[in-house]
Image: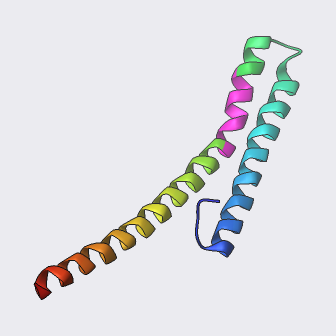
Amino acid sequence: MRLEDKSLGFVINFLLGIAWAAVLIGAVSSFLSFYQNNLFFAIVFALIGALPGLVAVLLLEHIITNKEKHLELKKQTKLLEKLLMEKERK
């Protein structure tokens, strides 16, 4: 788990699982609906069917990345303030 906040991490990981399931269901159901007519169209519609789930995955990964970035910036700010205090004491 990448997030330090347990409850937020649980929710985000749960939603990521749902998003990946939506990708799989969208791709497979679209493919199975159209493969009898034309294989090319089945592949195209499978990709289109997977798009909403992929967008959700990207959005959730973006949220995780921004949260990690924010936490890292907090840590760096604390360290810089500590260094500044030590420098001012000398």
Q: Residue at x 74, y 17 (%)?
A: 41
Q: Quadrant of residue 47?
A: top right
Left or right, residue 1 beside residue 83: right
Q: Residue at x 66, y 73 (%)?
A: 6
The N terminus lies in quadrant: bottom right
Dominant secondary structure, magenta: helix
Q: How is the image coloured?
A: rainbow
Query: Is 51 rendered above or below residue 84?
Result: above
For this rendering, which residue is in front, 15 or 40?
A: 15
Span shown in magenta: 44-53
Left or right, residue 14 beside residue 55: right
Q: Quadrant of residue 54?
A: top right
Query: Is 86 rendered above or below residue 65?
Result: below
Residue 60 forms part of the magenta stretch: no
The C terminus lies in quadrant: bottom left
Whole-percent x, y for residue 50 in the image: 70, 36
Query: Is 27 rendered above or below residue 77?
Result: above
For this rendering, which residue is in front, 34 or 61?
A: 61
Left or right, residue 69 beside residue 2: left
Left or right, residue 82 beside residue 9: left
Q: Residue at x 83, y 31 (%)?
A: 28
Q: Quadrant of residue 15?
A: bottom right
Whole-percent x, y for residue 79 in the image: 31, 74
Residue 48 forms part of the magenta stretch: yes
Query: Is 83 rendered above or below residue 60?
Result: below
Q: Residue at x 13, y 88 (%)?
A: 89
Return the residue found at the far front. 90
Whole-percent x, y for residue 7 in the image: 68, 74
